[in-house]
Image (cartoon, helix red, strand yellow):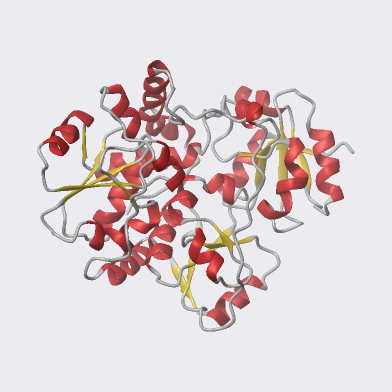
Amino acid sequence: MIPLTVNPSQVRSMLLLREEIALLDLRHESAFATGHPLFAANMAAGRIALEAETRLPRKDVPIVLYDAGEGLVAQATDRLQALGYTDVRQLDGGLQAWQAAGYEVFQDVNSYAKAFGELVESRRHTPSLPAEEVADLIASKANIAVLDVRRFDEYATMNIPGSVSVPGAELVLRAGRAAPDPATTIIVNCAGRTRSIIGAQSLINAGVANRVVALRNGTIGWTLARQNLEHGANRRGEVGAFAGAEANARDVAYRAGVRRLRPEEATALTAQAHRTLYRFDVRSAEEYAAGHIAGFRHYAGGQLVQEIDMAAPVRGARILLTDDKGVRADMTASWLAQMGWEACVLDGGYDGALEVGPPQVLPKPDPAHRYRRPYEGTDVDAGAMQAYLDWEYGLVEQLRRDASHGFFVI
């Protein structure tokens, strides 16, 4: 079926007015990463049957499809309509029309989360140290703790020597155990820049007594400085929050405009069928599998901030987070709210019957169609890593030119 069309100006208006819209790029991820609108989400046409009902929970949500001339839209429309989606339209002229209208295209994946991270550093002047200085501190056995905020599998592949794995949203919950001495300098690292900036600023926002800095440019910067990486490490940070962490995290969420909902209020929110609601459990996968509230999908908090376009492709939707300890949901929600989401935290809900079972995991795409991130693996070309950093440095200016993001930084 030939879908109804909508022009680039109308799509941009919907985004600016924060109306619900799923702007879907139907190309493979490798092509999507070459350039797309800021709030476009990638859903390859061949993966619609696998992904749509998980990522697009409301069947009458406005969906706008586009490609770059590959002829993917008509077939994708048929697939979505066969699944029951009722408001499927085509971006008139596709990606070329978006560019012809003078609108920005952003490279890479998770682009708007990365751009937001750069904006945070620009506005808050998040402190950082270069790889050479951190290496000297490690060599001199200085009073430091290096906390790696990536997924554990990324950490195990390669990590800063002596570092401990404390994935993103776990930082505020575990910093008190990882660095019990307030005189310890906490150094937060990721692969590149975004997660280390957000992680370091999370600890600062939450009021940890320690000096906190990011490792500038993460493992990419470390590699470019010709420092050695460790492989196969298995050190995990244990739960142990610093004094006042829970109250401070709640205050951070409050300042960002996050609402707290009791279970009965969350039930009423869920019943509002005219709006898309994403519900995420931001704890670890192990905690989720041991017992979780029905209807909540697992997405670890730090990765949720980084991958929000993948987790929640409907821009303008609502997001409800849950966490039995509260701290992770509060900190995660605080960042999502600053990124323009209507974010809420469920207050309680763990007293009743819980579902048991592992998280739902969407099948990974064919490796031939994936975009190889310039921070993946151990064999990335130095020129590609430097080009990636140069791209990140330019994101704040690109946000300014695009002028559609609506981000704020507390």
Foreground of the two, 113 or 170: 170
Task: Look at the picture and state if 70 lies above or below 407.
Answer: above
Q: Position of residue 83 (x, y in %)?
A: 83, 52
Q: Residue furthest top?
A: 383
Q: Residue at x 63, y 30 (%)?
A: 367
Task: Look at the picture and state if 96 lies above or below 17.
Answer: above
Q: In the picture, which quadrant includes the C terminus?
A: bottom left
Q: Total label count?
A: 0
Q: Residue at x 29, y 50 (%)?
A: 201
Q: Position of residue 347 (x, y in %)?
A: 46, 76
Q: Residue at x 74, y 31 (%)?
A: 92
Q: In the picture, which quadrant includes the N terminus?
A: top right
In the image, taking residue 405 as reference, residue 93 lies left or right, namely right
Foreground of the two, 233 or 183: 233
Foreground of the two, 235 or 395: 235
Q: Position of residue 401 (x, y in %)?
A: 45, 30
Residue 321, can we see it? no
Task: Look at the picture and state if 231 lies above or below 293.
Answer: above
Residue 216, can we see it? yes
Q: Position of residue 31 (x, y in %)?
A: 63, 26
In the image, taking residue 325 as reference, residue 342 lies left or right, namely right
Q: Quadrant of residue 131?
A: top left
Q: Residue furthest right?
A: 1
